[in-house]
Amino acid sequence: MKICGIVAEYNPFHNGHAYHAQKTRKLLGSDTAIIAVMSGNYVQRGDFAVLEKYQRAAMAVQNGIDLVIELPLSAALSSAQDFAHGAVSTLEQLGCVTHISFGSECGDISRIQNAAQADRSLLRSYTSKGLSYAAALQQAVSEKDPDAGALLAHPNNTLGIEYCAALHKMGSNMEPITVFRDGAAHDSTTAHIRPSASFLRTKILQDQMEECKDFMPSTAFSILSKACQNGSAPSSVSACDLALISYLRRFSAETLIPYTGNTDGLHYRLYQAISQNTSFNAICQAAQTRRYPLARIRRTLLRAYLGLTHTAAPLPHYLRVLAIGPQGRTLLREIAKQSTLPLITKPISEKKLPTDLQSYLQQDILSDELYTFSKPNHALHIGGARYRQTPYLYTKAHE
């Protein structure tokens, strides 16, 4: 049986995500099992997920995904390079994945694989000129390979290139495939037959959820609707402004260094922005420059809030199951046989983790507890809810 990995945030799950799963099975065979490695309660753009992780995972297994495993927090709040490294490492650690599928604006896997192996030797010379990592990478690669550099102008291509680079670096046997991204541009806030998740999040946060109905599978929209009705969604970073700012103002410029590194003066800039602004978004806007893109600023501040240093490796230490779909049980048995990492399927599994993994567990526990403050319903801010949470189980066969 072919087992294909997909890396995702599903924030929230929409028709484009369902299309990706369908096209992946069309390319590999209808009996292909799909495992999604999904960001948890925090996402790569440096924000709280609009809906908590178990609900988003439930959307996925109701619409074509067989198993959802959580992406490590340190990878979820990282640059594209480390995000991809952590995701591919997680898929590799499952021990049974034969393929990885990702969407791209290019749609040509050979071009993406060639770009993944392009010469990056000039990267440092461009970052030293004040360019962001992404801009510097594009410039450095373009000098050696203009075609590869052109691909890096598009965010989904960039992630695909980083996935392939990670596969190559690990010597992985996973075979990459790509699905042409036939929909709105990444982060587009305009309507489209398959709009971006950014468009949907904008509507959800503006209390215009009904406008999302035609762009999401009915089961996914139902989960979202119920969550909004009971106040467990939508979550947003702005809902935690006071908590975030009160914590961030405890830092001096020097004590921010573990989260920024001490190479480019970002800790001074963040300290000034934290001192002079009264909302998380305003802090981020004040701190961003061409050298410090907004997403990097947001991730860095959230990492400081969560106590996640910039040196924390984006690698899995255990495998947390968020949802189990039609072929999920079969996949879990295979993972249990093949993987060397502990498998967490319920809270009691955490008690069996070795002592050397407890610090990583406590980091995840803290991040999930702090996430609850982003929910509109204050009654849901009580602690300990995660200890009563088990993976969502869905058994209906793929239609």
Image (spheres, rainbow, N blue to C red):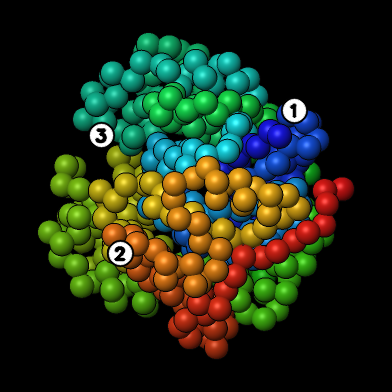
Sequence-wise first label, 1 or 2: 1
Q: Amino acid at mark 2?
A: Thr
Whole-angstrom CA distance, mark 1 to mark 3, is: 42 Å
User: Viewed as shown, does residue 274 lie left or right of 113?
Assistant: left
Q: Is residue 109 above or below residue 321?
A: above
Name the residue located 60 percent from the left edge and 41 percent from the top edge. Answer: 6
**Which mark's residue is nearer the viewer, 2 or 3?**
2
Residue 125 in the image, given as x and y percentages of width and height: 23, 23
Report if residue 87 is visible in the image: no
Report if residue 339 is visible in the image: yes
What number is the disc on residue 130? 3
* Residue labelled with disc 1: 27
What number is the disc on residue 355? 2
Residue 377 in the image, given as x and y percentages of width and height: 57, 83
Whole-angstrom CA distance, mark 2 to mark 3, is: 42 Å
Residue 271 in the image, given as x and y percentages of width and height: 21, 61
Name the residue located 47 percent from the left edge and 59 percent from the top edge. Answer: 42
What is the residue that sits farthest to the bottom in this orientation?
A: 379
User: Viewed as shown, does residue 184 lie left or right of 69?
Assistant: right
Q: Amino acid at mark 3?
A: Gly
Find out whether the residues at labels 1 and 3 contact each other: C-beta distance under 8 Å: no
Name the residue located 77 percent from the left edge and 67 percent from the top edge. Answer: 222
> How many badges with numbers are in the image?
3
User: Viewed as shown, does residue 152 lie left or right of 54?
Assistant: left
